[in-house]
Image: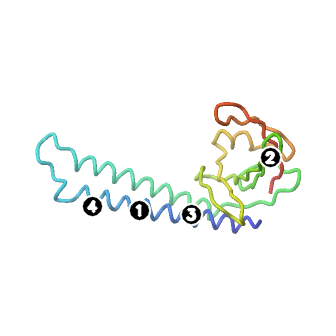
Amino acid sequence: MKKSDLRDAIVRELQQELARQAGAAAMARDEAISEESRAENKWDTHSQEAAYLAEGQARLAADVVGSIELYRTLPLPDFSADAVIALGAVVEVEAAGGNRRTRYFIGPRAGGLELEFDGQSILVLTPQSPLGRQLVGRRAGESIQAVGRGRPAALQIVAVR
Protein backbone atom coordinates (compact mmCIF):
# COMPACT_ATOMS: atom_id res chain seq x y z
CA MET A 1 0.00 0.00 0.00
CA LYS A 2 1.48 3.30 -1.08
CA LYS A 3 0.48 5.91 1.50
CA SER A 4 0.95 8.83 -0.89
CA ASP A 5 -1.73 7.26 -3.11
CA LEU A 6 -3.97 6.86 -0.05
CA ARG A 7 -3.42 10.53 0.82
CA ASP A 8 -4.32 11.47 -2.77
CA ALA A 9 -7.52 9.40 -2.51
CA ILE A 10 -8.45 11.21 0.73
CA VAL A 11 -7.82 14.58 -0.96
CA ARG A 12 -10.07 13.54 -3.89
CA GLU A 13 -12.84 12.59 -1.46
CA LEU A 14 -12.45 15.92 0.32
CA GLN A 15 -12.56 17.79 -3.01
CA GLN A 16 -15.86 16.08 -3.79
CA GLU A 17 -17.13 17.12 -0.35
CA LEU A 18 -15.97 20.68 -1.03
CA ALA A 19 -17.93 20.75 -4.29
CA ARG A 20 -21.07 19.60 -2.41
CA GLN A 21 -20.56 22.15 0.37
CA ALA A 22 -19.85 24.99 -2.08
CA GLY A 23 -23.00 24.11 -4.03
CA ALA A 24 -25.09 24.05 -0.86
CA ALA A 25 -23.61 27.40 0.23
CA ALA A 26 -24.42 28.96 -3.14
CA MET A 27 -27.99 27.67 -3.00
CA ALA A 28 -28.46 28.99 0.53
CA ARG A 29 -26.95 32.36 -0.42
CA ASP A 30 -29.26 32.62 -3.45
CA GLU A 31 -32.21 31.79 -1.21
CA ALA A 32 -31.18 34.47 1.28
CA ILE A 33 -31.03 37.23 -1.34
CA SER A 34 -33.99 36.05 -3.40
CA GLU A 35 -36.91 38.44 -3.88
CA GLU A 36 -39.20 35.62 -2.76
CA SER A 37 -37.42 35.57 0.62
CA ARG A 38 -38.23 39.22 1.36
CA ALA A 39 -40.04 39.52 4.69
CA GLU A 40 -43.80 39.92 4.37
CA ASN A 41 -44.19 41.16 7.93
CA LYS A 42 -42.05 41.78 10.99
CA TRP A 43 -42.35 38.16 12.14
CA ASP A 44 -41.22 36.68 8.83
CA THR A 45 -37.64 35.52 9.35
CA HIS A 46 -37.22 33.34 6.25
CA SER A 47 -34.48 35.45 4.65
CA GLN A 48 -32.62 35.77 7.96
CA GLU A 49 -32.73 32.01 8.46
CA ALA A 50 -31.50 31.47 4.89
CA ALA A 51 -28.62 33.90 5.54
CA TYR A 52 -27.63 31.98 8.69
CA LEU A 53 -27.73 28.75 6.71
CA ALA A 54 -25.58 30.26 3.95
CA GLU A 55 -23.02 31.42 6.51
CA GLY A 56 -22.90 27.95 8.08
CA GLN A 57 -22.49 26.25 4.71
CA ALA A 58 -19.68 28.66 3.80
CA ARG A 59 -17.91 27.85 7.08
CA LEU A 60 -18.21 24.12 6.38
CA ALA A 61 -16.73 24.65 2.92
CA ALA A 62 -13.84 26.64 4.43
CA ASP A 63 -13.23 23.83 6.91
CA VAL A 64 -13.00 21.33 4.05
CA VAL A 65 -10.53 23.62 2.25
CA GLY A 66 -8.40 23.62 5.42
CA SER A 67 -8.56 19.84 5.57
CA ILE A 68 -7.46 19.53 1.95
CA GLU A 69 -4.45 21.76 2.61
CA LEU A 70 -3.50 19.78 5.72
CA TYR A 71 -3.59 16.51 3.79
CA ARG A 72 -1.64 17.89 0.84
CA THR A 73 1.23 18.84 3.16
CA LEU A 74 0.95 15.89 5.55
CA PRO A 75 4.26 14.06 5.95
CA LEU A 76 3.89 10.31 5.55
CA PRO A 77 6.58 8.64 7.63
CA ASP A 78 7.47 5.01 7.17
CA PHE A 79 6.68 3.05 10.30
CA SER A 80 8.93 0.14 11.19
CA ALA A 81 7.68 -3.04 12.83
CA ASP A 82 8.11 -1.63 16.33
CA ALA A 83 7.05 1.97 15.54
CA VAL A 84 4.76 3.99 17.75
CA ILE A 85 1.45 4.94 16.13
CA ALA A 86 1.34 8.61 15.14
CA LEU A 87 -0.12 10.94 12.52
CA GLY A 88 0.23 9.43 9.05
CA ALA A 89 0.07 5.81 10.20
CA VAL A 90 -2.09 3.11 8.68
CA VAL A 91 -3.16 0.88 11.54
CA GLU A 92 -4.68 -2.56 11.22
CA VAL A 93 -6.58 -3.93 14.20
CA GLU A 94 -8.27 -7.24 14.79
CA ALA A 95 -11.24 -7.92 17.05
CA ALA A 96 -10.92 -10.57 19.74
CA GLY A 97 -11.36 -13.96 18.14
CA GLY A 98 -9.62 -12.88 14.96
CA ASN A 99 -12.76 -12.84 12.88
CA ARG A 100 -12.52 -9.29 11.55
CA ARG A 101 -9.73 -6.85 10.69
CA THR A 102 -10.22 -3.12 10.34
CA ARG A 103 -7.84 -0.57 8.84
CA TYR A 104 -7.52 3.02 9.99
CA PHE A 105 -5.54 5.98 8.75
CA ILE A 106 -4.50 8.43 11.46
CA GLY A 107 -5.09 11.85 9.89
CA PRO A 108 -5.15 15.46 11.07
CA ARG A 109 -8.81 16.07 10.13
CA ALA A 110 -11.81 14.55 8.35
CA GLY A 111 -12.33 11.83 10.93
CA GLY A 112 -15.07 9.43 9.93
CA LEU A 113 -14.26 9.61 6.23
CA GLU A 114 -14.40 6.07 4.88
CA LEU A 115 -13.00 5.07 1.52
CA GLU A 116 -12.14 2.03 -0.52
CA PHE A 117 -8.46 1.86 -1.34
CA ASP A 118 -6.62 -1.07 -2.95
CA GLY A 119 -9.69 -3.22 -2.36
CA GLN A 120 -9.72 -2.42 1.36
CA SER A 121 -12.01 -0.25 3.41
CA ILE A 122 -10.07 2.40 5.35
CA LEU A 123 -11.55 4.72 7.94
CA VAL A 124 -9.86 8.02 8.77
CA LEU A 125 -9.39 8.61 12.49
CA THR A 126 -8.09 11.75 14.15
CA PRO A 127 -5.90 11.65 17.25
CA GLN A 128 -8.69 13.53 19.04
CA SER A 129 -11.30 10.81 18.50
CA PRO A 130 -11.87 8.27 21.29
CA LEU A 131 -10.36 5.40 19.30
CA GLY A 132 -7.61 7.63 17.90
CA ARG A 133 -6.60 8.64 21.45
CA GLN A 134 -6.27 4.98 22.38
CA LEU A 135 -4.23 4.07 19.30
CA VAL A 136 -1.75 6.96 19.19
CA GLY A 137 1.37 6.06 21.13
CA ARG A 138 0.75 2.30 20.96
CA ARG A 139 2.64 -0.34 18.98
CA ALA A 140 1.79 -3.42 16.95
CA GLY A 141 1.04 -6.32 19.25
CA GLU A 142 -0.61 -4.22 21.95
CA SER A 143 -4.29 -4.43 22.83
CA ILE A 144 -6.85 -1.72 23.52
CA GLN A 145 -10.41 -1.69 24.82
CA ALA A 146 -12.81 0.09 22.47
CA VAL A 147 -16.45 0.75 23.29
CA GLY A 148 -18.67 -0.59 20.56
CA ARG A 149 -22.44 -0.78 20.66
CA GLY A 150 -22.42 0.01 24.36
CA ARG A 151 -19.98 -2.64 25.53
CA PRO A 152 -16.18 -2.80 25.51
CA ALA A 153 -14.48 -4.81 22.82
CA ALA A 154 -10.87 -5.98 22.90
CA LEU A 155 -8.88 -4.98 19.82
CA GLN A 156 -5.40 -6.22 18.97
CA ILE A 157 -3.13 -3.90 16.96
CA VAL A 158 -1.89 -6.19 14.18
CA ALA A 159 0.18 -3.84 12.01
CA VAL A 160 1.39 -0.26 11.77
CA ARG A 161 2.51 1.04 8.39
Q: On the image, numbered disc 4 is attached to which residue?
A: 30
Residue 99 bears which disc, if any? 2
Q: On the image, numbered disc 3 is attached to which residue?
A: 13
Residue 77, position in %: x, y?
77, 60
Nearer-N-terminus badge (2/3) = 3
Tag 2: amino acid: Asn
x 51%, y 65%: residue: 16
Q: Are marks 3 and 1 in contact (CB under 8 Å)?
A: no
33 sits to left or right of 92: left
Quarter of the view holding residue 138? top right
Please tell me how crowded label 4 is: few (under 14), some (14-19), or many (20+) other residues with Cα within 10 Å.
some
Q: CA distance from mark 3 to mark 1?
A: 14 Å
Q: Are marks 1 and 4 in contact (CB under 8 Å)?
A: no
Nearer-N-terminus badge (1/2) = 1
45 sits to left or right of 132: left
Residue 148, position in %: x, y?
67, 37
Nearer-N-terminus badge (4/2) = 4
Q: Label 2's element?
A: loop
Residue 31, position in %: x, y?
26, 57
Count of picture labels: 4
Q: On the image, numbered disc 1 is attached to which residue?
A: 22
Q: CA distance from mark 1 to mark 4?
A: 12 Å
Q: Residue furthest left?
A: 41
